[in-house]
Image: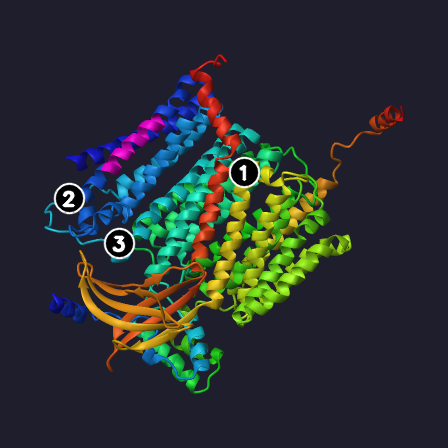
Amino acid sequence: MRALALCLSLILATPALAVQPDEMLADPGLEARARMISREIRCPVCQGESIDDSNAQISRDLRLIIRERLVAGDTNQEVIDFVVDRYGEFVLFNPRATGWNWVLWLAGPAMLVVAGGGVFLALRRRSAAPEDRLSAEDEARLRELLKD
Amino acid sequence: MIIELGHFALILALMMAVVQAVLPLWGAQRGNAVLMAVAAPAAVAQFALVAFAFGALTWAFVTSDFSVALVVGNSHTLKPMLYKISGTWGNHEGSLLLWALILALFGASAAWFGAGLPERLRARVIAVQGLIGVAFLAFLLFTSNPFLRMAVPPMDGRDLNPLLQDPGLAFHPPFLYLGYVGLSMSFSFAIAALIEGRIDAAWARWVRPWTLAAWVFLTIGIALGSWWAYYELGWGGFWFWDPVENASFMPWLLSAALLHSAIVVEKRESLKSWTILLAILAFGFSLIGTFIVRSGVITSVHSFANDPERGVFILAILAFFTGGGLLLYAFRASAMEARGVFGLVSRESALVANNILLAVAAFVVFVGTLWPLFAELLLGRVMSVGEPFFNAAFTPFFVALAVILPLGAMLAWKRGDPGRVSAQLAPAALAALAAAVLSVAVVQGQGMAALAVLLPAGAVLALAWRRFPARLRSHLPLIVLAIGVVGFLFAIQTGRSALGPMGVLIGSWVVFGALTDLWSRTGRGADRLGRLMRLPRADWGKAVAHAGVGVVIFAVAAMLAWKTEVITVVDRGEFFDLGPYRVQLAEVREERGPNYFSTMAEMVVTRGGAHVVTLYPEKRVYPVQAMPTTEAAIDYGALRDLYLVIGDPQEGGGWAVRAYIEPFANWLWAGCLMMAFGGLISLSDRRYRIAAGARKAAPARGVPAE
């Protein structure tokens, strides 16, 4: 049975589980930066996983590249640009606010301004409108009655 | 034979749904009572037929009938019984049959519990429900027939995806579908009201429990999915902003908005047309969710059962119901006349703000989810939208919602007094601030010192409270919250160091606010505690659900901010440190499960020499699907989870291991349960029960002689 399990594991070549100990940098500051970057980079062949979580070989390669660049002294942005230059915008989980992407970034705030503003105006108009106010005559009559 | 009967029952159900959709609608239009009376029995019959079909399919799975193609594709004789049953809906065809079953169940419920409804409204609601049934049953029969036979049955099946063979995920889809499909009731009521041209408080009183029930199911379903991701995927994440998660989250946000705006219709006869619009949109987003999941148009981690060609059919259903609903709305909404007027500062306005924020939050999720599709089709940009975007774009709206929640919940109807409410909430704001300060101190290891300062300070404040100027008292919450909001946004945009305390601040503000709200309902004078217990259940439900929101906010921030992670290599017998704990890899051995092979580690966790727990993380291989999975071992605790994962053997000897301390993980699920439980308490409120009781009692018996 154990032999069978071994065979299977060889055939399947069970993928490594996300970040591996042997990849990690000795410098904890650099390693933390590497983790931060790799959480924002999408694995090019998986379905919606970051390279930090992914088991794929290409993700491991990317994680190693990121660490290489960091050791070489790149800033976080330079590392990300380096990866995007080679793998395209697709690998960015945090879409850049350029061109049409402004629509994506501003959709929420714009909607809030439009909806909030519209409702505010409507409410102000409505609450300013006379609401069950007594007419002048009624009010005079009320005063009369209250005098007694 | 049973399979053929099931198939036949499904075809009959489609016929019955056509009857259920057409005759009552026509009857209601013509004022024909006989045609309207068809609605209830047709709905019940349709439910019985779909239930029979579903039973037949379940039977095929339970008995491993490999002459059925669906069973071959998704089952295996060695699979445990629970997963044979859950395998029924662990695939495209079966899950749609479950959809249709729940839809028919809701239609039948309208027949069973709707006796108190006006006849015309009831006929129309059941008819619209039938119309949705026609669409989905046709979809099933024409594109996704679960009852197809194999010409040559194989000896054994191809097994269910191992990730789905899990108790959490076995019940995740049914709950989610109860939520999705539950919103069809709100939709049907909205459409019926639009055809009728009028809605009133009674209408809202009917719609609200259905929406509330759907929302409760959605909450539980989403929480189950999140919990599953947390323990199964092996890195302790609980939410990934994955399109499939977003698909369930959007209806959740909108149904939360809907159940709040329905309160305004019920109590104040205002916001009518907005409520109708929300009901249409909420169900529309359920359909969009179904479309996203079932069509696989946006590939994602969870789409195990996708098929692009069927997407077109669902898109047509989506377009017909959402488009048709919105069209009807455009023509008829002006007929909905609002009666209640309210001031700029009032409970109504606060609920409008709640609605705007929830709707905008749903809109952000919607745009973010569909943007990659849009960008690829129209802009030619292949891109991704993931967690960083949603964290930055979604969070501010939810934080704003949490900040105004306690204030809005306590404002009076019609015209509120913000100064008074604010002064009432000042203690809650100060307590929240104290909790945040305490959390910072605890992280620094100065918890006791902070308590020593905070407790006397709190006591002094409490004693001197009445002497403070009223203006200061009423401005305090605003000052505290301003600090909180600025800090939270700062934390989101920059590092994470402030995220934890800010989550504590806002989360406990919501929790303490809910408690203050509940306490303020007890009035003044003696026996407040007694009155607290006798408060209407709706008040308790509101407080519990709102407190649940606060607990969730706190837990999410805590898990993101204070997680401890160790990734290392250890050999048998070696130790490594995990925060205050010491973990020893005692043993690694090969085990065999019913339908998998396992590499199981024995890891002993100690703290200060004392044994804490022994955990057994596994790596499994399911040979039939040729798929490895990780089974993390978790020691659940009130304040933290210990989360251990065993990785691969290393070339230089030893094993890769990953270990986490997940702070307050259980609070996340507890918060979700509180929300759901709050909804249930509210559902059991007297005014719904009385209405139900009166209905049953009145026609059957006369007035009992006393």
The numbered disc on residue B638 is: none
- Relative to B610, is B439 on the left or the right? right
Looking at the picture, tell me which residue is in the foreground, B437 or B632. Answer: B437
Q: Residue furthest top?
A: B705
Going from N to C along the chain, the mark reached first, 3 or 1, is 3
Q: Residue furthest front?
A: B610
Query: Amino acid type of disc 2?
Result: Asp
User: Is B429 within the magenta?
Assistant: no
- Relative to B546, is B599 on the left or the right? left
- In three-dimensional space, the C-alpha distance between marks 2 and 3, rounded to whole angstroms, equals 19 Å
**In the image, residue A45 lies at what x, y percent?**
32, 68
Q: Residue at left 50%, top 31%?
A: B688
Please report, as a chain letter, where disc 2 is located. B
**In the image, residue B77 lies at what x, y percent?**
15, 50
Residue highlighted by disc 3: B165
User: Disc 2 vs disc 3: Cβ atoms closer than 8 Å?
Assistant: no
The numbered disc on residue B538 is: 1
Please report, as a chain letter, where disc 3 is located. B
* Residues at discs 2 and 1 both on one chain: yes
Query: Over which residues does the magenta segment extend?
Result: B42-55
* Callout 1: SS: helix
Q: Residue at left 62%, top 57%?
A: B431
Q: Residue at left 55%, top 68%?
A: B447
* Callout 2: SS: loop
Residue highlighted by disc 2: B65
